[in-house]
Amino acid sequence: MMNKKNIQIKIYPGADELAARLAADFQNVVNEAAKLSRRIHIALSGGSTPALFLQKLASSPYRATIVWQNLHFFWGDERCVPPDHPDSNYGMTQKYLLDHIAIPDENLHRIFGENTPQNEAKRYAAEIKRLLPLTHNGWPEFDWILLGLGNDGHTASIFPGSDVLEDRTHVCAVATHPETGQKRITLTLPVINCGRRISFLVTGRNKAEMVAQVLSGNEPLPAAFVQPSHGILEWHLDEQAGKLMRLT
Ligand code: 6PG
């Protein structure tokens, strides 16, 4: 199921090293685009490891040395709550990153979690299609998509067994968290898979089994369906999360 040839797996001693290396890489990518006056479109994720990375970007030297003007932030998924709710992925980004950097408001393309989910999924899909370059078959192409991995193998808000797993026609969809029933809005697999660069950020011993299962490629878990159509797929792990990989 999974084409392992296209996957790069990077293992760091700990979560802090992972976040630091990725922040340095992020600066290179964003500042190279700025030199060419090229807009760059990046989709952020919720979750604990992405949160660490955001904090790193907000710290010295990155907050001052990254050229934020050409960078447009989007979100891979959002919980259907207002932005000031503790569950909001936008709220988390604001707290850890956006409140600390000089990025123009018009570069922030949040999912309005406070809107009616179905309408918002349509509105956000239209915004993405309007602003991003489209591939030859009409899918928007993000420069970089950051993803987390849930303990059940979900990524973005694509949960095991959900209809969203089968969606090959929409850019965004409404999802329901299988345990809490919380509504979410998520990018679908075809748009994730059209990303030029797709990076999972996963840390901690409690993710080790799931990382091993997803990377074994033998199970129909949502994260295993992340397979770039033309871009690159990276897994950034700390030693704890990568611990069981060889055992499968
Ligand atoms: C979200 C996500 C989700 C998350 C994983 C990992 O908004 O919940 O985008 O896919 O990244 O659930 O989250 P943790 O790192 O907190 O386990």
Image (spheres, rainbow, N blue to C red):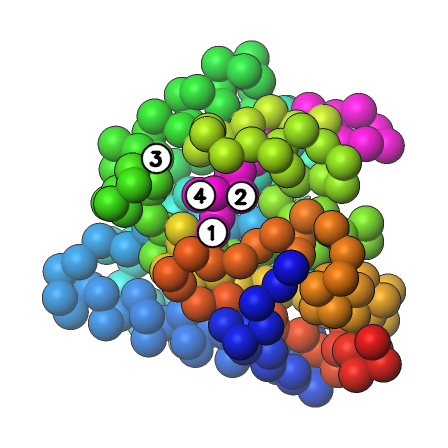
**From the viewer's perspective, is residue 238 above or below residue 148?**
below
Indicate yes or no: mark 3 CB to ligand 1 under 8 Å: no
Q: Residues within 10 Å of mark 1 (few under 14, many from 20)?
A: many
Residue highlighted by disc 2: 189
Is label 4 in a helix, a strand or a loop? helix
Cα distance, mark 2 to mark 4? 6 Å
Magenta stretch?
177-193
Residue highlighted by disc 4: 191
Q: Nearer the viewer, residue 33 or 157?
A: 157
Q: Which amino acid, mark 4?
A: Val
Tell me which label, 3 or 1, sits earlier in the chain: 3
Cα distance, mark 1 to mark 4? 5 Å
Q: Is residue 76 left or right of residue 159?
A: left
> What is the x, y in percent for residue 191?
44, 43
Badges 2 and 4: C-beta atoms under 8 Å apart? yes
Residue that appears at 22% across and 53% down: 39
Q: Is residue 180 left or right of residue 91?
A: right
Say which quadrant the N terminus sits in: bottom right
Q: Is residue 33 left or right of residue 124?
A: left
Q: Residues within 10 Å of mark 4 (few under 14, many from 20)?
A: many
Say which quadrant the C terminus sits in: bottom right
Marks 4 and 3: which is nearer the front? 4
Residue highlighted by disc 3: 128
Badges 4 and 3: C-beta atoms under 8 Å apart? yes
Q: Which amino acid, mark 1?
A: Asn
Tell me which label, 2 or 3, sits earlier in the chain: 3
Is label 2 in a helix, a strand or a loop? helix
Cα distance, mark 2 to mark 1? 6 Å
Badges 2 and 1: C-beta atoms under 8 Å apart? yes
Residue highlighted by disc 1: 193
Q: Quadrant of residue 177?
A: top right
